[in-house]
């Protein structure tokens, strides 16, 4: 790994400085503060660990553009797993091709 700052590290810095400020608004209108997004990411991280996700694993995220994608990106990054976000509107064969190529856990 290089000395480059990773996404979750940038988020953690912003969350520490702006915990009560809005971090994102998703398509449903839900607004999450930095502290709220951080808490959800911590919950997701624990669930992913319980499901057996380990550092280096690939996590295929099939979802609409929503807060849950940001939550899972943060959780996977903090675990040193590789998040592979995919639009839920893709066809079955398209999803299967991506899954076969990425070999998610």
Image (cartoon, helix red, strand yellow):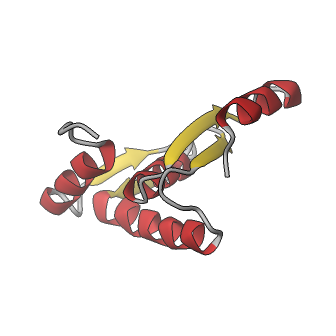
Instruction: Report whether 64 appears left or right of 66.
Output: right
Q: How many marks?
A: 0
Residue at the far left in the pictured view: 17
Instruction: Report whether 78 appears left or right of 3.
Output: right
x, y percentage for residue 3?
Answer: 17, 39
- Quick check: can you spot residue 65? no
x, y percentage for residue 8?
Answer: 32, 50
- Quick check: can you spot residue 89? yes
Instruction: Report whether 46 appears left or right of 64.
Output: left
Q: Residue at x 64, y 44 (%)?
A: 60
Quarter of the picture containing the N terminus is top left
Q: Residue at x 30, y 58 (%)?
A: 34
Tell which of 26 and 90 is nearer to you. 90
Q: Residue at x 42, y 53 (%)?
A: 80
Q: Residue at x 54, y 46 (%)?
A: 69
x, y percentage for residue 58?
Answer: 58, 46
Residue at the far right in the pictured view: 93
Tell which of 51 and 2 is nearer to you. 2
x, y percentage for residue 48?
Answer: 58, 66
Vertical relation: 43 (above or below) 58: below
Vertical relation: 98 (above or below) 69: above
């Amino acid at each position: 790994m290089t000395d480059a700052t990773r996404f979750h590290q940038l988020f953690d810095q912003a969350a520490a400085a702006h915990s009560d400020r809005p971090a994102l608004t998703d398509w449903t209108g839900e607004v999450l503060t930095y502290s709220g997004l951080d808490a959800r990411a911590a919950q997701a991280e624990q669930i992913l660990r319980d499901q057996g996700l380990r550092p280096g694993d690939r996590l295929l995220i099939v979802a609409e553009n929503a807060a849950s994608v940001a939550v899972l990106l943060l959780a996977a990054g903090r675990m040193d797993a590789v998040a592979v976000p995919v639009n839920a509107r893709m066809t079955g064969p398209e999803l299967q091709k991506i899954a076969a190529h990425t070999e998610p856990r």
